[in-house]
Image (cartoon, rainbow, N blue to C red):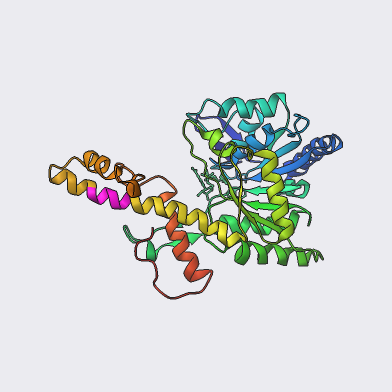
């Protein structure tokens, strides 16, 4: 028997074959009741730092005309020994993420226990029930050599598994919204063919409804606000997907104060995320070098930067940090480099400064 152990030591049995049917029956019952009340069913795959809070934000949203909840959310997480514990914790109304933001824990508790608009599951069959599917699984960049992103590669295996399951399970009318930070081209060159092939095998001729909108979430004091009350960029693979993604995000996010930017195609919005993060990593690296120069020469870098900021064209120059780090900034440029070569097939060595 296998177990998954939560960070505070609670032990949860990994589900067995026989548990899957019962779990799907539980979900079907919940969904049937919610559908009768007019709710839209949203499945979020990947209950990590991004998915857990996104699931909470959607479940907490209200119809902007009636003020009543209109989305029932199923958080789907694969039952690995490393991550299964998140599901039973979620279903007790407890956030699987320890956050500085005091809004996170009550958000999850309120949606699971009081509003009953949120549940979590381990079965991929949940995907069959979705009107909208949000993909928040990870996509790592594996560096082979320290200080050299060019020998690294994007690990898209978790995403490919998800796309395959999505193609096998979803209804052709379901909007698939990819939020994961991906190598540009992933929605069009990886997700689309995998899902289309699975549709064909099921005798479905419809075009998959795919969209991309990246997260700008910052897991700090304003964690929830950085998902709900923040500007978003989005795009769809065709007109119908674009309309659907605009509608969905407008229903669950504060687009009145933080309007959406709608781009023409997923490769554009995927590139947008990579350039956004890679730009920040690059200027941080640049200023880090000058902070080392300053430190070894008795120069106060803060005075230098404040003096430069007086010039209007340079007023947004940033202060250096203690290096360049975090999870996203060092890896995202690598995803772009890898995509250029492996998804788009170009050989030219255009990247000298990125990431
Ligand atoms: N954490 C951040 O601050 C942040 C900010 C912006 C964007 N992002 C991006 O968002 C994405 C997700 O990041 P995260 O920090 O939430 O990652 P994470 O590792 O915390 O969460 C990913 C979750 O997906 C689950 N998962 C993986 N494969 C699965 C599968 N096939 N089926 C179902 N579940 C699966 C994992 O078990 C895990 O719980 C990444 O692309 C990241 O770059 C993260």
| Residue 352 figure quarter | bottom left
The reply to whether residue 303 is in sight is yes
Residue 176, compared with residue 87, is above or below; it is below
On the image, the x and y values in percent for residue 253 come to 64, 39
Q: Which residue reaches farthest left?
A: 297
Farthest bottom residue? 347
Residue 350 lies, in percent from the top left, at 40, 70
Majority SS type along the magenta span: helix
Q: Nearer the viewer, residue 66 or 348?
A: 66
User: Residue visible at 24% across and 51% down?
Assistant: 289
Between 120 and 16, the one lying in front of the other is 120
Q: Quadrant of the N terminus?
A: top right
Residue 198 lies, in percent from the top left, at 73, 64
Asked if one can make out residue 123 in the rendered structure from this viewpoint, the answer is no
Residue at left offset 60%, top offset 25%: 106
Q: Residue at x 23, y 46 (%)?
A: 291
Residue at 48 percent of width and 68 percent of height = 340
Residue 303 belongs to the span the image colors magenta: no
Q: Number of labelled discs? A: 0
Q: Residue 288: horizontal and vertical position, in percent?
A: 27, 48
Instruction: Please give left or right for residue 154 compared with residue 143 in the image.
Output: right
Which segment did they paint magenta? 284-290
> 170 or 86: which is nearer to us?
170
Where 142 falls versus 16 (above or below)? below
- From the viewer's perspective, tell me whether residue 228 is left or right of residue 64: left
Image quadrant occupied by the C terminus: bottom left
Residue lying furthest right: 36
């Amino acid at each position: 028997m296998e177990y998954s152990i939560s960070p505070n030591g609670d032990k949860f049995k990994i589900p067995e074959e026989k548990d899957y049917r019962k779990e799907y029956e539980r979900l079907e019952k919940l969904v049937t009741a919610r559908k009768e009340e007019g709710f839209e069913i949203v499945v979020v795959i990947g209950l990590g730092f991004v998915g857990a809070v996104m699931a909470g934000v959607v479940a907490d949203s209200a119809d902007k005309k009636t003020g009543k909840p209109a989305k029932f959310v199923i958080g789907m997480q694969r039952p690995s020994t490393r991550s299964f514990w998140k599901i039973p914790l979620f279903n007790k109304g407890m956030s699987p993420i320890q956050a500085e933001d005091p809004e996170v824990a009550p958000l999850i508790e309120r949606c699971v226990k009081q509003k009953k608009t949120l549940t979590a599951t381990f079965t991929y069959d949940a995907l069959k029930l979705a009107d909208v599917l949000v993909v928040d699984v990870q996509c790592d960049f594996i560096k082979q050599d320290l200080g050299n992103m060019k020998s690294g590669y994007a690990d898209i295996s978790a995403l490919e598994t998800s796309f395959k399951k999505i193609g096998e399970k979803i209804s052709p009318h379901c909007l698939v919204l990819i939020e994961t930070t991906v190598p540009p081209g992933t929605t069009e060159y990886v997700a689309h063919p995998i899902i289309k092939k699975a549709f064909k095998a099921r005798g479905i001729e419809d075009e998959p409804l795919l969209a991309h909108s990246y997260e700008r979430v910052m897991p700090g004091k304003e964690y929830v606000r950085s998902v709900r009350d923040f500007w978003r960029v989005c795009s769809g693979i065709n007109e119908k997907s674009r309309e659907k993604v605009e509608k969905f995000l407008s229903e669950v996010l504060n687009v009145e104060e933080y309007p959406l930017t709608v781009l023409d195609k997923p490769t554009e919005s995927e590139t947008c995320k990579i350039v956004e993060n890679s730009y920040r990593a690059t200027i941080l690296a640049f200023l880090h070098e000058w902070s080392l120069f300053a430190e070894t020469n008795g120069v106060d870098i803060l005075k230098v930067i404040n003096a430069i900021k007086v010039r209007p064209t340079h007023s947004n120059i940033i202060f250096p940090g203690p290096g360049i780090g975090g999870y996203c900034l060092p890896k995202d440029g690598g995803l772009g480099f890898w995509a250029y070569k492996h998804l788009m097939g170009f050989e030219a060595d255009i990247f000298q400064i990125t990431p």
